[in-house]
Amino acid sequence: MRTVLITGANRGIGLAHTRRFLARDVRVFATARLPSEAGDLEALGRAHPDRLTILRFDARDPQGPAGLKQALGDQPIDLLLNNAGLGDRHGFGAIDATTFMDVMAVNTLAPLLVAQALAENVAASSRRLIANQSSQLGSIADASGGAYAYRASKAALNMITKALATDLRARGVTVLALHPGWVRTRMGGANAPVDVDACVAGQQAIFDGAGPADSGKFFNYDGKPIPW
Ligand SMILES: NC(=O)c1ccc[n+]([C@@H]2O[C@H](COP(=O)([O-])OP(=O)(O)OC[C@H]3O[C@@H](n4cnc5c(N)ncnc54)[C@H](OP(=O)(O)O)[C@@H]3O)[C@@H](O)[C@H]2O)c1
C-alpha cells in the first residue's frame, strides 16, 4: 500500500486510520470538512510533512468530489476509503424529511460520487481498492428496527458497493463494504465495546489481504463476512 485517500479523517475511525497508515510509511490524503479546525490532523501533518496532505471535503457539497479530483490530478490511489458518515437515531413516528435526506446525501450519495470522480486514480494504482465504511445497521438480515435514515443510508451504500464491484471489475478495482464494529468514537459513544485502534488494525489487515475474489463483499472489522 503506497497511497491512500481517507474521507472524514479529522477524528474517530478516519483519524486512527490516518495515524496508522502514516506509521506504516504510507502516503495519506486525508479529508476534513473544516481543515482549520482539524487540529489532530494538523499535528500529524507537522510530523509527516512529506506524506500527509489535508484536503477540504464536505460530503454535502455536490462539487466536493470534483474538488478532490482537481486536487489529485492523475495521482494513483491504492485505497480510497469512503469513511465520512453521519449518525441519526430517529425512530418510527419521528422521521423528519430534511434530516433523512441529509443523512442520505452524506452516507450514500457522497461515497458514490467520490468513487465516480476518483475511479481512474484507483485503477491507475497497484492495489486498486475502494472501501465503503458501512454499518451492520444497514444489513437487511439484521432485522431490528429504529434509526431509519441511518439504516437506509447504509443499506443503499451496500447496494452501491455491489454495483461498483460489478462495474469496476474490468478495471481490476476491488470494492468492499465494511462494518467497523461498535467503536468508541463520538458516533459510537463511550460504552461501545471496540477500541478504535483495534478496529483500524483489523480493517487494515483486510485491506492488505483483499483481492478481486473479495470484491462486492461485506466484512466485519475482524475479517468475518456479514450477511447483507
Ligand atoms: N463508531 C461506530 O460504532 C460505527 C459503527 C458502524 C459504522 N460506523 C461508520 O464509520 C464511519 C466513521 O465513524 P466514526 O465512528 O469515526 O464517527 P465520528 O467520530 O462521528 O466521525 C465522523 C467523521 O465523518 C465526518 N463527516 C460527517 N459529516 C460530514 C460531511 N458532511 N462532510 C465531510 N465529512 C463529514 C466527520 O467530520 P466533522 O468532524 O467535520 O463532522 C468525522 O470526520 C462512519 O461512516 C460511520 O457511519 C461507525
Image (spheres, rainbow, N blue to C red):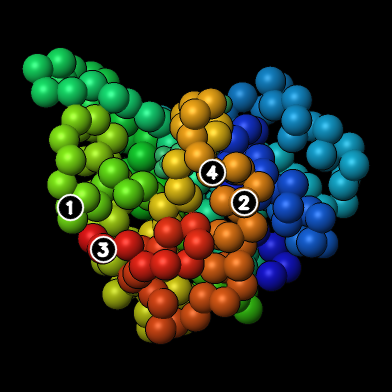
Q: Are marks 2 and 1 in contact (CB under 8 Å)?
A: no
Tag 2 residue: 198
Residue 157 image offset from top left, x and y in percent = 30, 51
Write the residue at 24% across / 30% down. 147
Q: Quadrant of the N terminus?
A: bottom right
Earlier-in-chain disc, 3 versus 1? 1
- State the CA–CA distance, disc 2 to disc 3: 22 Å
Quadrant housing residue 215: bottom left
* Residue 113 seen in render: no
Write the residue at 16% across / 35% down. 145
Earlier-in-chain disc, 2 versus 3? 2
- State the CA–CA distance, disc 4 to disc 3: 20 Å
Q: Secondary structure at mark 1?
A: loop
Residue 113 image offset from top left, x and y in percent = 39, 49
On residue 140, the disc is 1
Closer to the camera: disc 4 or disc 3?
A: 4
Dot 1 amino acid type = Ile
As drawn, 53 above or below 185 = below
Residue 162 image offset from top left, x and y in percent = 28, 66
Dot 3 amino acid type = Pro
Is label 4's Cβ within 8 Å of ligand 1?
A: yes
Dot 2 amino acid type = Ala
User: In the drawing, does residue 110 fall left or right of residue 25?
Assistant: left
Marks counted in the figure total 4
Earlier-in-chain disc, 2 versus 1? 1
Q: Are marks 2 and 4 in contact (CB under 8 Å)?
A: yes
> Which of the pair 222/26 is nearer the observer?
222
Closer to the camera: disc 2 or disc 1?
A: 2
Tag 4 residue: 194
Tag 3 residue: 227
